Image: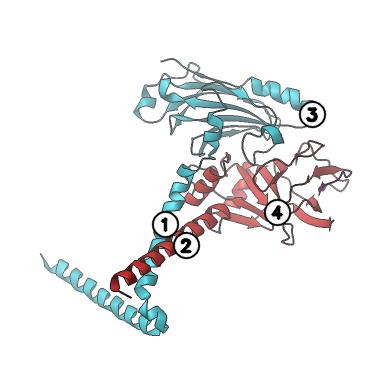
Amino acid sequence: MIQPYLQLLKQLLSQLLKLLALISTVRLLLPGWLRRRWRMVVASALLIGIVHICATFAAPALSSGHAYQLLRVKLPLNRMVVLPPQAPARQILPYLPPDVLYAMCRYDLSGGPVAVTAVVADAGWALSLHTPQGGNFYVLPGQQLRRTEVSLLLVPSGPEGALAPRPENPADTAIASPTSEGLIVVRGPLRGLAWAAETEATLRRASCAQVKR
Amino acid sequence: MSLLRKVLLNLAVLVVLALAGGLGTAWYMIEAGSQLSTRTFGPWVTWAAAGRPDADPYTRAHTGRNGLLPLSSTLELTFRAKTDGNGGRLSSACDYAIVMDDFEPAWWGLALFDGQGRLVTNAAERHAFSRSTAMREPDGRTVITLARDARSGNWLPSGRSNRIVLVLTVLDAAWAAGIHNGGAPKSMPEILRTGCR
């Protein structure tokens, strides 16, 4: 009964001895200063790795310039807002394409699901849903010369979502949001000044409203 | 030197090394990117997993730190160029021709920003061109001229900002899928420096 474990232990010890022999050989090949300070070098490398991993994982949380944080103060809750065209004095986010008009809604599902309607009119248009961390968990792109009226119900994920009311129209899609808060973005490309009013009018048809339980 | 002083000195060196090395490498991987998280085509660099909920930690940190709100990279790819085709740093002191030949995604937009992601102020209030707004040459190519002073055709003013960044947004699921499957685009816009003052 105990035989297989003894065998495994024997194999482990043999591998360990081989590793120790390898380390001794490598140490002999190192220059003198490194041979004396090899523990310091190994400890430094390990600590650099630990700090690197911690800094990488902490960076999104510690950053004050997160897109959701920047938009949180500018967008009302559960209401779609058409933003003015991006310009140097009124740029809402860094590197946001200025040749696109945006309608945005900051949603919170803690009070109930959120109903979303929008029109994605052509290629370049898109309806997207984002978590506060910036993850884009749903996107519906526009198709060339095909106007799509979208109607969906945003529900919390997990057991809460299962209890949420079903969409009134069976053709509507229920989307489970991985977080209780997030952003709904409708983007419409500006095809030139002549079409700006039409693009804005289409964006104004987008809506976002809480459905009472 | 007493043993205690030696130990404390070693410990101090260790902490400084760990902080400088760990934070420095993390900053580099988050800001500049590496082959683990980005793909490069000439001067154009894209974060291959941007916007995706399953993005790697470097991409998530890059998106968070820079205040970006990208669509999933399975649909949209955003390329940034900080240099011209020969590797020279883009500068508003120089003029450039951005040539798109056989570049046909469903939708593309090209915009100019400064090094901090702010739109470059200019009297013409022009900051971008897209597939819908750029005029084509008779031979089918699209040429956008990036220059401080007015030019004929598709003129994108480069303003007075010292460091400039070109951002190319491509919205086309099939095109993006080709990149994700390890392929290279058939063609990317070339950035040619035409002169400096």
Nearer mark to the viewer, of 2 and 4: 2
What is the distance, in whole Å, between disc 1 and disc 3 at their CAs? 50 Å
C-alpha separation, residue under disc 4 versus residue under disc 1: 41 Å
The tint of chain B in the picture is red
Determine the secondary structure under disc 1: helix
Q: Which residue is mark 1?
A: A51
Q: Are marks 2 and 4 on the same chain?
A: yes
The amino acid on which the numbered mark 3 sits, given as a three-letter code, is Leu
- On the same chain, marks 1 and 3? The answer is yes
Q: SS at mark 4?
A: loop
Same chain, labels 2 and 1 = no
- Residue B21 is marked as 2
Which region is colored magenta? Answer: B147-151
Task: Find residue A119 and report its horizontal and vertical position in percent.
Answer: 63, 24
Residue B65 lies left or right of residue B96; in this view the side is left
- The disc, 1 or 3, on the residue closer to the chain's N-terminal end is 1
Type of amino acid under label 1: Val
In-image side of B13 versus B111 (left or right)? left
Q: Amino acid at mark 4?
A: Lys
Q: CA distance from mark 4 to mark 3?
A: 31 Å
Q: Is residue A74 magenta?
A: no
Image mark count? 4
Q: Which chain hosts label 4? A: B
